Amino acid sequence: MGLLASVALAACSDDSGASNGELDEVSVTVSHWPTSGYSATYMVGQEKGFFEEEGIALEGIVPGAGGGTTVRSITSGDLDFGEVSTTGLVQATMAGAPLVGIATSAGSIADLVWVAKEDSSFDSFEDFCGDGVWGITAPGSNSEALTALMAQEAGMRPDCVNTVATGDLAAGLVLVRSGEVDASILTEPLLTTELAKGDLKPVAEAVEYLPNFIQVVTVASQKIIDEDPELVQRFVNALGASQDFIRENPEEAGAIFAEEAGVDEETGVEIMTRLAADERFFTQELTVEGLTSTINGMEVLGHYDGDPIAWDQLIDQQFLPEESRIDLSELPGYEG
């Protein structure tokens, strides 16, 4: 999942980061913009002036392709900041990409829910062990990794769940309603709008099984960290202020989100209120548990075999407050 930002740098000479009152122009590409829940961080940051307060002009937000495209765009030097899945960060860094995680963007998977038809006999994830058809988006996807990890947490054999790749979220929704699969994954705002129609029900909330799974991390190129760490700090500060506001003011944030995401205000407020209630969703704090879950997911999918991980190169915590930092040596495969 990707958020990228390319930066046209202005000279920085004072504490605000702006020179002669000018703002550093930063253009951002957000994966699944403007409907992903974490898109709200940028919407609110713009609307409430948090980027401007840090001497940054957020100029233009366009949807990003995410995945490998996200990683390549940053590591090629075309773009400086990004937002990728934690798995994508680990895989890219282990492959030698000069990509560095600097904060969490969505520290929870509270927006990922599997749904079934309202009249289905399936009421929980455990019901699918040995029965039914469980939809994932694609082999090797986050939804496949989450399914395996959820099975472990529930004390089930991962292979007891019959998974089928459905394609994107909308395609999975069609297959559920046609009866070709018994459950498929949804995220916001599709989750809230489709459940409101009354013919679907939630059967498994991923966060109930994996409360600390870090969904998305903010990353930067090593080049921008080396050349302009002060700009990186201000960018992180603006995102953090926006996340704080959403947690403290979910109704106002929901109204802002609704306008940008193209949903009615009541739906936007419902979505932001639910996500903000999860203290891990809108946060920049890294956690040992969240990063460990990522490695566990990679391991069950055969993408990690226990090789050493240079976490000190993969994660740079200098832009986070002291109390938000973790001991990297506690992470799986740690190699300083």
Image (cartoon, rainbow, N blue to C red):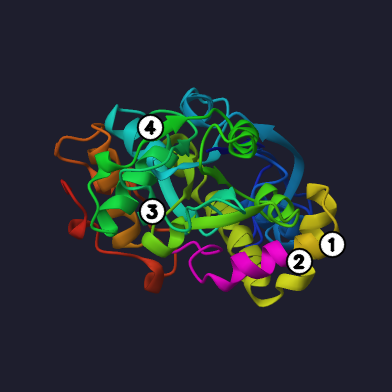
Would you name the residue on which mark 4 appears?
98
Q: CA distance from mark 3 to mark 2?
A: 32 Å
Amino acid type, callout 3: Asp
Q: Is residue 69 above or below residue 44?
A: above
Residue for point 54% across, 40% down: 82
Q: For residue 269, which numbered disc appears in the image?
A: 2
Could you tell whether 177 is left or right of 99 in the image? right
Q: CA distance from mark 1 to mark 2?
A: 6 Å
Of residues 63 and 163, the one drawn nearer to the viewer in this rendering:
163
Q: For residue 265, which numbered disc appears in the image?
A: 1
Residue for point 77% across, 53% down: 20
Q: Residues within 10 Å of mark 3 (few under 14, many from 20)?
A: few
Of badges 2 and 4, nearer the viewer stands 2
Q: Secondary structure at mark 3?
A: helix
Q: Is residue 274 found inside the magenta-colored segment of the image? A: yes
Residue for point 26% across, 43% down: 158
Of badges 1 and 3, nearer the viewer stands 3
Q: CA distance from mark 4 to mark 1?
A: 41 Å
Amino acid type, callout 2: Val
Residues in magenta? 270-285
- List x then y, in percent, for residue 262: 83, 47
Q: CA distance from mark 1 to mark 3?
A: 35 Å
If you read the primary sequence from the N terminus, does the residue marked by circle 2 or circle 4 appear first? 4
Of badges 4 and 1, nearer the viewer stands 1
